Amino acid sequence: MEKSSQKKLSIPLLLGSCRIGSESLKVAEFILENLAANNQIATELIDLGKYNLPMLEQRLQDNSNLPFNLLQFCSKLGQADGILIVTPEYKNGYPGVLKNALDYLEPQALKYKSIGICTVSSGSFGGLDCLAQLRLVCLALGGLPIPDKLPIANVNDLFDEKGNLCDSKFTTRLESFINELVWYTEALVNQKQLSN
């Protein structure tokens, strides 16, 4: 089957921050624009700030009165072929809002899904501690974090006041990262089809 006749890969972008004025949102919107421009990908922004998920008090299967936004969140990740997570690093880890959201997912909810991780930091290391921790959580959910990573250091220097990209090298890094995410997503989707 030729690529042009294949169904687009569903790769939503999950924003792991709900902080007002988050620099991660600027990064997520820029990446989303690049994802949407790729004719192999169908994407959307899953902004945890807009989902406003309640703190986890009961597992999904133990709760008979689930809010619609929670069901929608779990459904979108469950139906995705792959996921791209953009998250800031907070105190050498990732935000509690992201952990809370991922904890709602059933065990193995991300099984055979490729996960691309972009970490955002105002410091010089680009959120590598956050990246390492998040990879472990994705593995525990059955997901496959791709080998490539997209750490963004000194995020305040990445865009100007109008939101224009200041670092042209970032576009090259992003393109390579998206290509690898597409490769792994496509490989996993094809393998699942062969197994069915």
Image (tube, helix red, strand yellow):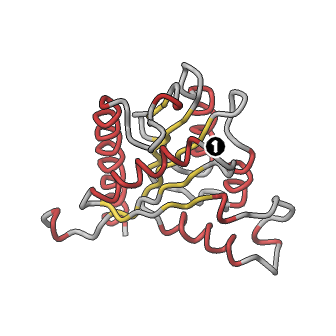
- Of residues 184 and 39, the one drawn nearer to the viewer in this rendering: 39
Residue 98 versus residue 172 in the image, above or below: below
Q: Using the image, determine if residue 49 lies above or below residue 119.
A: below
Residue 93: where, in percent of width, then height?
69, 33
Nearer to me, 158 or 150: 158
In the rendered image, residue 30, in percent from the top left (x then y), is placed at: 41, 48
The quadrant of the picture occupied by the N terminus is bottom left
Q: Which class describes the residues within 10 Å of circle 1: few (<14), some (14-19), or many (20+)? A: some
Residue at x-position 31% and y-position 52%: 187
Q: Residue 127 is drawn in which quadrant? A: top right
Q: Residue at x 65, y 64 (%)?
A: 50
Q: Residue at x 55, y 35 (%)?
A: 120
Q: Nearer the viewer, residue 25 or 74?
A: 25
Whether residue 165 sits left or right of residue 95 in the image: it is: left
Total marks placed: 1
Horizontal side of 5 relative to 63 (left or right) equals left
Location of the C terminus by quadrant is bottom left
Question: As drawn, which residue projects farthest toward the left?
Answer: 2
Displayed quadrant of residue 103: bottom right
Amino acid type, callout 1: Val
SS for dot 1: helix
Location of residue 104 in the rendering, given as x and y in whole percent from the top left corner: 72, 60
Pointer 1 residue: 137
Position of 169 relative to 65 (above/below): above
Query: Given the current orientation, which residue lies at the most extreme top position?
Result: 124
Instruction: Single out the residue that lies furthest toward the right.
Output: 57
